[in-house]
Amino acid sequence: MISRQIKKIWRHSENTAGQPSLTQEEAPESSCVSMKSDTSIDKPVNFSSGDCAEVSNITDGSNPFKKKQLDSVFQELEHKLISLMKKELKTFKSLLSPDYPSCSEREEEDDEDQIRVREMFLKITLNVLKKMKQTDLANKLQTKLAPLCMNKHKSRLKEQFQRMNEGISAQGSSTLVNEIYTELYITEGGSEDINNEHEVRQIETESRRSETQETQIKCNDIFKVSPEQNKPIRSVLTKGVAGIGKTVSVQKFILDWTEGKTNQDLHFIFPLPFRELNLIKQKNISLMDLLHQFFTDTKELRSTDFDDYKVVFIFDGLDECRLPLYFSKNPSLFDVRESASVDVLLTNLIKGNLLPSALIWITSRPAAANQIPPECVDLITDVRGFNDPQKDEYFRKRINDESLANRIITHMKSSRSLYIMCHIPVFCWISATVLQRMLSEAESQAQIPKTLTQMFTHFLMFQTKLKSQKYDGKCEVDLQQARKSLESLGKLAFQQLEKGNLIFYEEDLRDCDIDVREASVYSGVCTQIFREEFGLNLGKVFSFVHLSVQEFLAALFKFLFSIQVKENKSSVSDLLKGEVDKALQSENGHLDLYLRFLLGLSLESSQTILRDLMTQTGRSSDSKQEIVEYIKMKIRENLSPEKSINLFHCLNELNDNSLVQEVQTYVNRRDESSLTGVRLSPAQWSALVFVLLNSEEELNEFILSKYDRSDECLLRLLPVIKASRKADMSGCHLTEESCAALASVLRSNSSSLTELNLSHNNLKDSGVKLLSDGLRNSNCKLKTLQLSSCSIGEEGCEALASALRSNPSHLTQLNLCRNNPGDSGVKLLSDLLKDPQCKLEKLHLYQCSIGAEGCGYLASALRSNPSHLRELNLSYNKPGDSGVKLLSDLLKDPDCQLQTLLLSACNLTEKSCSSLASVLISNSASLRELNLSHNKLQSSGVKLLSTGLKNTNCKLETLHLDNCSIGSEGCVALASALRSNPSHLRELKLNFNNPGDSGVKLLYDLLNDPHCKLETLQ
């Protein structure tokens, strides 16, 4: 806050605004001395010295000042203050000069009074610069004059965040972030819904989503307001599955700031990971004390400084938070000096009670994101990991040998399941670690990992150094000790997986007989995170480098230390069947990847890699065929698509592709309706879904007629529709059963569907009502909906209008041609058009039994909300001349953006031509395309229309007048009008009229006019 003293000086500066500029003097020569040293700037007036001793007499009642003496004192005071301001402004100008050196360091501080005066004048200067809309200069000046602690804080953060370990923290192999960092694919506007699905399922879903339907954002720009947003962004919630790159994005954001590359309007960034906050032992602590403990270089910061500086708090890893975060129950807190529990501090900081001007960035796995109330979040972003070009870029940056990098990329692309997993940066690191060694050692191609289990098995062997000397050039470790250690790690992984924990602490390790002092031996698998630089001896936090590594070790523990030891009591196949059943009982697929690994480990090829850990081998491979048949039997049981797809991944881990090969022949057919007459079993339908979803071709458009025109085919292939951007199901004999299924797709937060064509199906009102349940859901992102010839009446229109009013902001094209809504149905649709949130740009109502009354409803609605609709098709209706008059009045509205009006076969006469001519004459009309074909306008009507065409305000580019009973007189009028205003019309159609030879000649002579822009004349 500015003190009263500052405000007085500020008022004086406003009153003297007419004086000559105080900054027009030459800038001093640049110097490397301190801003605050005696030699870098003239000292301000020392008000505590004897310079103004006479002023003390003013307060002496026995010797009152005369007015003349008072004027003299204030004249001198004014001179000194202006002198002070000039000197300070001179210094500020030199600081902002491009040639000012960056080497200046702070020397001795001035005395407290002088510092306070300078701070007050800096506040005034910053305030004036911002009023002058010179915000960048103000931010630059504030940064240049930042307190010493800010630079120390930046340097400490740079030191901390400039290197990354890619999963290993204790082997001394960290890499500079700027050398290895690959830009991640991050999108804005994610869903607030909870997604509890297994994160590998989410990755597989994201891999099929088209990038064109998302708004991409760079991590350095998350607080920048886009043109679509109408308010500043204070709080951002970034979601992403484990290992997808959330923490690395935070690291890059901070590093770029410390290096002066981006976000230089920020003065302080405070990264506070939840895993660190979990360990604060104090029952109560103030926010100031918490910051001083974590960031010791900021101890000179005062609570009032936060009013002057732009600050960001970054809370990484909400899913790791062990605090309750009682947003509704916690007491309100407004003072950063007041002590409270860490939970109360966080909730009040996020809500904006504490430091309302501070920016907040929270990262989380999807399942935990709902802990933050929606009203506390201004922007949601999703980290989608690497897209395909970014995957290739990562491998080329990670591997210096270009030829080797290309071989690795080729190999990863040859296995769809491996390449999909490369969306996760940590999996790219795991793959690079394995393949770089194996391919560079020229091992046989047969041994190169082709499945997830093989990749993770090799990774484990490298990291635990159990491979022979050819892998690491070192002697093998004690196998018995290694087996014991891996059993403990596997037990930890299995127990924490059952509890749903991704991080764990020393007590968790001790429960599994792991010596914390030896945990770093496995640092490639179990990452030790201990941040001394925060100045807090908080203890150690452990995690596996990725959830998939934890799941692999859990499966390894189950296989090596549970299944094998029980072989005498029960067959391996029975135990594996039990794990299949257990995984299928999980609604959200939390054991999906664990099951894939477990089955893959049962193969003899995997046991060969693990031979040093195995106590016995051979028998488990005999059970392969039995477990394969059991999985196929489960697939035949009509499971949910997600469960069936995972079972196909399981078969892939078992190297069995027989079901996939059965349906591949149908997929390879190029003929229409390739499945018509073919009776596929449930297992074959599931196989077909798996093949289509895992195809290398992008699922851009799904066309149902390519397979079979039936409800059954649609229902069976629903997961493929869900993953596609466009779905064309026109003319496929669909019923309301399909509408209900499609509604479930539209309600799904993982659906990619933006265009849906259901035209020429007998859906009726009942089907449209079911479909509307999906359209009204906030997850529905449909932009185009085509329902032509679907037997829809008034009730269907009512359901559609109601649904689109509930979720009006996405649909831009609606086609209801050849239905029977009538004027009453159009009234309901018109109510939708009035909604200011409605974004409809194209509305097609061809042959919908609409009369003049319906046109009146439409015109009234578009006058209320005229800025969105661009195209209106009312052909083959009966608006009559009166309806066209209402529409013409609308088109003259300067706010109306309608560019295309189709009125073919509407029983119009020359009266309509007169109305439309008035539109063409209007200088505010946006009309560019007009279709009046199949109306009996005659030459008299065209003459009236031509009065508009010849006007220079007319911007019409396309005019269709087919079959309008136009004779030679009409052609003469048209030719004359277009010679008068030849520069706009590009297309003119006059088919099925009677212009005669003379009329045709006049029109074709137009084409020779150098000013004529006509390109199509028919």
Image (cartoon, rainbow, N blue to C red):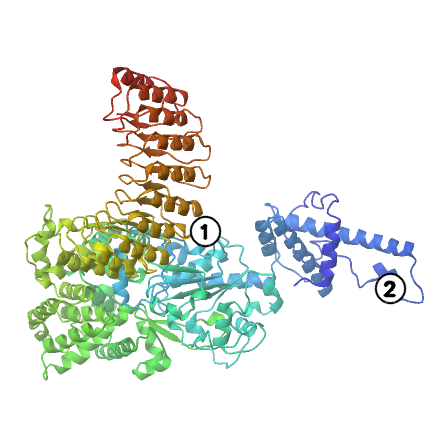
185 up-or-down from 843: above or below:
below
The quarter of the displayed image where residue 427 is located: bottom left
Front position in the image: 680 or 589:
680
The numbered disc on residue 710 is none
Report the Cα–Cα distance between label 2 and label 1.
57 Å
Q: Secondary structure at mark 1?
A: loop
Q: Please identify the quadrant where the N terminus is shown.
A: bottom right
Q: Please identify the quadrant where the C terminus is shown.
A: top left
Where residue 403 appears, as percent x and y from the top left, is 25, 49
Task: Determine contact: label 2, label 1, CB under 8 Å.
Answer: no
From the viewer's perspective, tell me whether residue 251 is left or right of residue 200: right
Q: Which residue is mark 1?
A: 226
How crowded pointer 2 is (Cα within 10 Å; few <14, some 14-19, many 20+) is rated as few
Front position in the image: 786 or 67:
786
Where residue 131 appears, as percent x and y from the top left, is 63, 51
Residue 242, visible in the rendered structure: yes
Where residue 691 appears, as percent x and y from the top left, is 15, 56
456 up-or-down from 947: above or below:
below
991 up-or-down from 111: above or below:
above
Q: Amino acid at mark 2?
A: Ser
The quarter of the displayed image where residue 576 is located: bottom left
Where residue 543 appears, as percent x and y from the top left, is 34, 72
Residue drawn 23% across the image and 64% down it: 471
From the viewer's perspective, tell me whether residue 601 is left or right of residue 947: left
Q: Which residue is mark 2?
A: 56
Given this view, does label 2 or label 1 mark the residue nearer the observer?
1
890 up-or-down from 123: above or below:
above
Q: Amino acid at mark 1?
A: Ser
Number of dots carrying numbers: 2
